[in-house]
Each structure stands twice: as C-alpha cells, then as structure tokens.
Image (cartoon, rainbow, N blue to C red):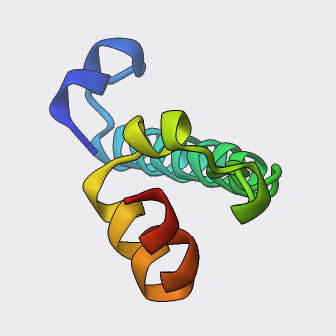
Amino acid sequence: MSAEFADIIAINDDIEASQANIDKLDKLFKAAVKAEVEKRLAGSAPKGNTTSAAEITKDTAKKMSLAELQELERTNPELFNKLF
C-alpha cells in the first residue's frame, strides 16, 4: 500500500497498533477493489460488429477496417469477390 494512505490512518506512538490499522485498511481496500472488479467483469460482454454477411453492401464494405475486410475475404470469399 502506498505511503500516501498514512494521512488517513490514525498513527500514534504505538507502532504495533498503527501497523495493525495499516494492515486492516490494506485488507479492506483490496477487498473493495476486488469486489468492484468482479462486479464489472460479471456484466455482459461488449458487443462487437453485428453486421451479417447478408447486410454487407458495397457502402458498408467501404467503411470496414482492413482487419474486417481480411476476415470477410477469409470467411466469405464469394461475397468479398462480389463486392470488390
């Protein structure tokens, strides 16, 4: 844990008690971060390009990235050749 957190922890002459407070804050902070990460990962996956081969026209093909065009050529060479 960063030393910057020392400002929010009650530190006194009792080093053992101060270290226990630091350890407790460290444990609680890490648990809170872990819970938030798990919550965000539990959400739905990001949606990618949902354009199907039937929806691809010359206009939509012109807007596709090079990687998307390469994928189209690999997976549907007939449509790729038709469009280009």
The quadrant of the rendering that contains the C terminus is bottom left
Please state the horizontal and vertical placement of residue 39, each as a whole percent of the image.
77, 48
Looking at the picture, tell me which residue is in the foreground, 37 or 14: 37
Residue at image location 61% in from the left, 54% down from the top: 34
Residue at image location 52% in from the left, 51% down from the top: 30
**Hey, which quadrant is residue 57 in on the image?**
top right
In the image, residue 79 above or below residue 5: below
Residue at image location 30% in from the left, 25% down from the top: 5
The quadrant of the rendering that contains the N terminus is top left
Q: Is residue 11 left or right of residue 79?
A: left
Please state the horizontal and vertical placement of residue 44, each as a whole percent of the image.
82, 52
**Hey, which quadrant is residue 22 in on the image?**
top left
Please state the horizontal and vertical placement of residue 51, each as a whole percent of the image.
70, 51
**Hey, which quadrant is residue 71 in on the image?**
bottom left
Residue at the top extreme?
7
Please state the horizontal and vertical placement of residue 21, each as a whole percent of the image.
47, 39
